[in-house]
Amino acid sequence: MDIGLRKIATFTEETMLEGGKTASRPVTMVVVAAVVKNPWAGQGFVENLRPEILRIARPLGLEMTRRLVAAMPGERVEAYGKAAIVGVNGEIEHASALIHTLRFGNVFREAVSGTAFLSFTNTRTAPGALISLPMIHKSETGKRSHFITATFQIADAPGPDEVLVAIGASDGGRIHPRIADRFEDMKEMDSEQAAGEAVPA
């Protein structure tokens, strides 16, 4: 099926040292980014985006996921996320349309046995801009050690009438995490509140 795909790029980053201290194990992040023609470009305001979402989202998700799990098998993935960036002639809604559908997201989520929502970026930039792709733990949404971001750029994308779509995965969290998880904060705050209420005014 012709979905207007111009190019796919894969980025791999492996970190061994952070803050002057060697990691207990290296952490690898992989990003697969696809550049496609904006299917709504040149049409003015399009009310119904659904036909093109149905045509493009699933095959695009399948191809990108195939490439990502080839680089990082699903059982290794601990954190994941997605991004969509529309060129300057398009609407941010055009970028959002291609990634905020289960026809795209579920392909990736199921391939890596994830249960959490895919954290995301959707924005508009000129070609060559630095792109941030945020990630969270694939099943434990409050696990702050896995609040991480991959950054990358493609020199000639997105073009004015293109959308750059990306998925990312990591086989670990930050190298030396030292802050509490969200749920630990909640327990501490509940305890503090209970202690405060027990103290006479």
Image: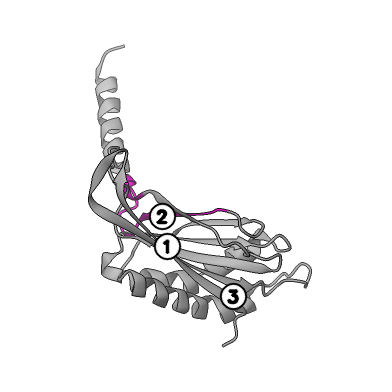
Residue placed under numbered mark 2 in the picture:
135
Disc 3 crowd rating (10 Å Cα; few below 14, some 14-19, many 20+) is: some
**Quadrant holding the N terminus:** bottom right
The answer to whether residue 73 shows anywhere in this view is: yes
Which picture quadrant has residue 77?
Answer: bottom left
In the rendered structure, find residue 53 and report the number of the disc placed on it. Answer: 3
In the rendered structure, find residue 168 and report the number of the disc placed on it. Answer: 1
Spot occupied by residue 71 in the image (x, y as percentages of width and height): 35, 71
What are the residue bounds of the magenta stretch?
A: 130-146
Decide if residue 36 is on the left or right side of residue 79.
right
Q: Nearer the N terminus, badge 2 or badge 1?
A: 2
Q: Nearer the N terminus, badge 3 or badge 1?
A: 3
Answer whether residue 136 is magenta in the image.
Answer: yes
Spot occupied by residue 73 in the image (x, y as percentages of width and height): 30, 71
- Residue type at tag 3: Ile
**Quadrant holding the C terminus:** top left
CA–CA distance in space, label 3 to label 1:
21 Å
Badge 3 element: helix
Which picture quadrant has residue 51?
Answer: bottom right
- Residue type at tag 1: Gly
CA–CA distance in space, label 2 to label 1:
7 Å
CA–CA distance in space, label 2 to label 3:
23 Å
Badge 1 element: strand
Decide if residue 26 is on the left or right side of residue 168.
left
- Residue type at tag 2: Met
Answer whether residue 63 is magenta in the image.
Answer: no
Which picture quadrant has residue 42?
Answer: bottom right
